[in-house]
Amino acid sequence: MSNKIAFFIFDDKLITIHRAHFSFLNIHEEKHIKISELFLRIISFMIDSFKNPTIEISNKITEIEKIIFLKDYRIVLIEELYFIKTQSRILKKILSITEATILKSQDKYKVSYIYQDIQDQLLNLLTVNEESVENSTHLMNTYLSLSDQKNNEVVRLLTIFSVFFLPLNFIAGVYGMNFSFMPELNWKLGYAFALCLMAIVVVVIYLWFRRKRIL
């Protein structure tokens, strides 16, 4: 997400050392420009290069937030949220280091309007990235909460089904033992009695759930 660049400032020249190519170094030369002003212009363009990724991350978080709260949260991957949170945290850290470095030279450049613009740019970007870090953290917590809630609903549904079927299985198990001396086995209405008993158990359980406002 970032590459290092070193500045060596002299009275009559400015030397930069870097491995990667930076588009913000392609500035038009102006005659009789002060080295300090040239340095500040480069810094301003450099900080401006963080604007697009900052906005992109903020927009991604907004879109994911809409999906989670207005659509199906399962469309979003937790890995995507973690990646966005990491990007925001790295951007914030880089900008904080850049701000600390620039503040060290404020005694020399603070009178320049470009320096004030740089400070405003940094403050704005840091604020947006800080909000992105917080929002991504909140979204991750919300996502996990929704996942837990969904799992709890599934467990609750399975529990309700088990409450209904356990007594029925018990009744079926008792009359399925086929002992020789079970009066109900030779009873003409034994089958109807077992079905009625099961129906009564189901109705009682249902009414109890309704009374407890579980269903």
Image (cartoon, rainbow, N blue to C red):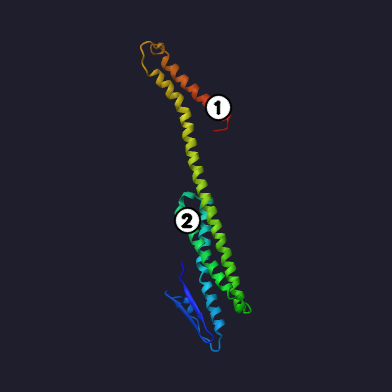
Q: Which element carries disc 2, helix, strand or loop?
A: helix
Could you tell me residue 52's position as x and y percent? 51, 68
Could you tell me residue 189's position as x and y percent? 42, 13
Q: Is residue 184 left or right of residue 127?
A: left
Question: Residue drawn at (54%, 86%), measured in percent from left and top?
Answer: 11
Could you tell me residue 48's position as x and y percent? 53, 72
Q: Is residue 201 left or right of residue 123?
A: left
Q: Residue 82: give its label.
A: 2
Q: Amino acid at mark 1?
A: Trp
Q: Is residue 7 above or below residue 132?
A: below
Question: Residue drawn at (50%, 58%), measured in percent from left and top?
Answer: 85
Eye-nearest disc, 1 or 2? 2
Q: Crowding at label 2, few (<14), some or many (≥20) Cα neighbours within 10 Å?
A: some
Compare marks 1 and 2 and give the one earlier in the sequence. 2
Q: Amino acid at mark 2?
A: Tyr
Q: Is residue 58 above or below residue 197?
A: below
Q: Is residue 22 above or below residue 137?
A: below
How far is the residue under mark 1 from the one under mark 2? 44 Å
Q: Residue 208: give its label.
A: 1
